[in-house]
Image: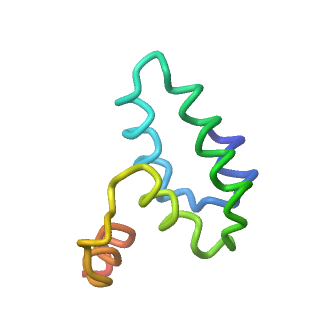
Amino acid sequence: LMDFRRRWDIELRFESRMVEHLTQRGAGWSAELERLDAELKEAGVPPVCRSGYLLVVMGQVTEAHSDEDFRRILCPTLS
């Protein structure tokens, strides 16, 4: 996971969300990490947007969420 985070320049504060998501996958966590890696390769998302993109790919954010919801999810300490 640390290699993935460093390779894609994902901020450290997002790591807990990644751990939570991968833990839910159980034994399939490695395949899920590979899927997320492929998603980022294909999407070409700039570093500043990668955490947000991963939230969408992981199903934690949908079109129903507002920009304010999205900000609270990514930056809970900025409330």
Foreground pick, 32 / 2 = 32
Rendering quarter of residue 23? top left
Foreground pick, 19 / 25 = 25
Q: Identify the residue at horizontal 40%, vertical 40% (top origin).
A: 21
Which residue is the extreme one toward the top?
Answer: 27
Numbered circles on residues, count: 0
Q: Identify the residue at horizontal 64%, vertical 35% (top origin).
A: 34
Residue 38 x %, y %: 68, 45
Question: Is 43 on the left or on the right of 67, as rendered?
Answer: right
Residue 56 x %, y %: 42, 60
Q: The N terminus lies in which quarter of the figure?
A: top right
Colour approach in the figure:
rainbow
Q: Is residue 28 above or below residue 64?
A: above
Q: The C terminus lies in which quarter of the figure?
A: bottom left
Question: Is 35 on the left or on the right of 38, as rendered?
Answer: left
Q: Is residue 38 above or below residue 69?
A: above
Residue 18 x %, y %: 47, 45
Q: Is residue 32 above or below residue 47?
A: above
Question: Is 75 on the left or on the right of 37, as rendered?
Answer: left
Residue 63 x %, y %: 31, 71
Q: Identify the residue at horizontal 32%, vertical 80% (top origin).
A: 78
Q: Identify the residue at horizontal 44%, vertical 38% (top origin).
A: 19
Question: Is 75 on the left or on the right of 41, as rendered?
Answer: left
